[in-house]
Every structure is written in structure tokens, then in C-alpha cells.
Image (cartoon, rainbow, N blue to C red):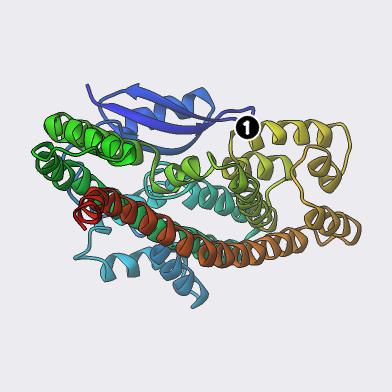
Amino acid sequence: MPKFHAQIVTPTGLRETRTLEADSRDTIQQQLVAEGVLVISIKNAEPLNQFQPRQRFDTVVFVHELKTLLESGLSLTESFDVLLDHRRQSIEFDTLTRIRQHLNEGLSLSQTMMLYPQHFPALLVASIAASERNGTLVAALVSYIAYDERISALRSKIYNASLYPILLVGIAMLVMLFLLMYLVPRFGAIYDGVDMKLPWASRIMLDLGSWLGHYRWLVLAAIAVGMVWIVRFIMRHGPEESLMLVLSRFGPLRRRLHIVFLSRFYRALGLLLEAGASVMQALDMAGSMLDSNGRLQLQEAKSRILQGQGLSEALHRAGLTTAVSARLLAAGDQNGEAVNMLRQSADFHDLDLTRFIEQFSRLLEPVLMMAIGLFIGLIVVLLYLPIFQLASGLQ
């Protein structure tokens, strides 16, 4: 029986990943909904043909198109009829057809989307569900598009800033491995035939190269196993979460990552409140944007709100604010502009993060280049140092 990884939000607001066995995703979906948990995503635990690129439902494009059709005055069902005609030859046609059938059966759009968590993020579903109660569906779609653009822009900047150093370090390690496994053992064979005393640093490097050359297949096998583990780790957690887990290991970046999570949390919370969700419902949903420590802090904030504290004070006392966002949210509580202040807090921190990423990249890249150059240069110098000593002795 196939295994699936299901990401859920429990009734207490905690985000969990469960591994379940069932015949299909739909069975898992029905089982989890019956338990009263919110399903974020359901993925195959061991997908077949996992190295083949898979076509996916483009949710953002779908939201754009649906928003445009609804703004033109078409009803929801008429909009889906137009989308079906437009996407007749696309991979989304089957999904859109099933959604149209559910709408004909009397389900709302949010209830229908909830049946396909692999296509529609839980945040989008919750935003639409809240907007359906007050007739602001188009506004909710517009807000989600703006939210996605901001989140995607920040995600792209983090990826771009991380990609070059990772590639640079990876290529440098391959070059150094080639030098140590191939070139150094050959120099060692030459020096073994010469009666001379080698410098201790050169001797250590030659011994290391000789060991790596002798056990090269074991070393290559270990590297291959490590690469497979890395690929499986990324496929299980996703590129974004994997990158965040790696970056969180570095102390100087941990505070910045906390601000990244806070910015996403503020933006998601503002989106849900603007759509018409209650404060507690919005906090439950937006909590999925936080890391594990942030979700524990959110539980404290929710308890404080239930005790009668305001949103800004509860978040501040729970540690879910910065010096700037605390002032902005407090002002929002006073003037009734909480949604706008949440959005402005996210914008402020996004701008600050963008500036930090640019400065960090400008500093990190030359430092990495210098360190890699020094390390490779050290290997070359230690290889030729005995030759220089021999030449000076002959003179």
C-alpha cells in the first residue's frame, strides 16, 4: 500500500508531518478531515519516477485568471466554464472539470479547493472561505495575488543569494578532491623515488593524498551515498524548508531567519483578517508560516488573546514582534488599521532583509573566493615545495 507524507495543522495550532498508508490521496484527505485537522499538503512518501520532472497545477495563474473573469462580471460557474474552454488541452483540465462538478453539486469554492490540497495552499483556501461569508471573493483573490508576489520575491532573493555560494563551494570541493585523489598521489610516487627529507606539511598532504588515492572507490561511494541522502532530504522537506534548515545552523543567520518567518506570518495574518476571518482562525492558519519555536510562541499569544489582551500586546509578550513591528501593531490596534499595520510591518522587514541579503552576498562571495584560492594554492605550493628545496640544495 502506498505511503504518503501529510502536513497538517492540529486543532491546537501545531504543524505536524504524518506518514500514513492508504490507497490514494483522497482516502488520506477524508481520514484527516474526519479527525478535525487542517490538511496543508499530501505528498507521496516514495514517488515513482522521482527524478523525472512533473507537470503541476499552476495555482497562481489559475487565481489570476479566475480573478479577471469574476471582475468582468461573470458568475463563478460561468468563469469555470470559460476556464474549461481555455484549458481544454492543458494538464489542468481534469482538475478544473472536477471542481466544476463539485460546484454543480452545491459545494462552495473553498470546500471544493479543500479536496485538492496538493493544488491549493491552505492559506488560499482559508482566505476564500472567509471571503465567501461576506461576499468579497474578488478582493480575497486580489489580496492573495499580492501576497504571493511578495512572498515569491523574497523567496527568490534568498535562493539567488544562496545558490552561487553553494555552487562555488561544491565546485571547489570537486577540484580539491581531484587534486588530492589524482594529482597528489602521483607526486608522492615521484618523491618516494628520491632520497630527500620532505617538509612535514608536504609529508602530511602526500600521506593524505596517498590514502585517498588508495581508497578512492570507497571515498567516491561515500560521496555518492551522501548525494543520494541530500537529494532525498530535499525531496522530502522541499527546497525551501531544506534551505531554511541548513541556514538555521549558522548562528549569525538565525536571527535573520526568524525575521523571515515573522514577515511571512504578518503577511499571511493580514491576508486572512482582510478576507474576514476571525483573529483566532487567522492565527491558526498563519501559524503554519512560522518555524517550530515560533508556533510554540504563537500558542502563548493565543492564550493571552483569550484572556483579553489585544493582538499587538499578545504577540509582543509572546516574542513574535520586533522593535519596529511592535510599535506598528500597537498603532494599528489603536486606530483600527491592524491589517494595514501587519502589511507595513512585513514590507519593512522585507526591505531590511533585502538590504541584508545584498550586503551579505557582497561580503561572502569574495571571502569564499579568497578562501578557496588560498586552499587550492596551498595544495599546489606544498606539492612543489620539495622541488624548490631540492633545486636550492643543488645550487
Q: Amino acid at mark 1?
A: Gly
- Which residue sits at x=63%, y=51%? 256
**Image position of 358 (left or right of 299):** left
The answer to which quarter of the image holds residue 171 is bottom left
Q: Is residue 211 visible?
A: yes
**Image position of 47 (left or right of 277):** left
- Which residue sits at x=26%, y=54%? 380
Residue density around tag 1, few if under 14, some if 14–19, many if 20 or more, within 10 Å: many
Q: Nearer the viewer, residue 118 or 313?
A: 313
Q: Nearer the viewer, residue 385 or 255?
A: 385
Q: Is residue 145 visible?
A: no
Q: Position of residue 169 (x, y in %)?
A: 35, 52
- Which residue sits at x=37%, y=44%? 118
**Image position of 291 (left or right of 387):** right
- Which residue sits at x=29%, y=23%? 22
Q: Nearer the viewer, residue 79 or 44?
A: 44
Residue occupying the far bottom of the picture: 72
Residue at the spot of label 1: 13
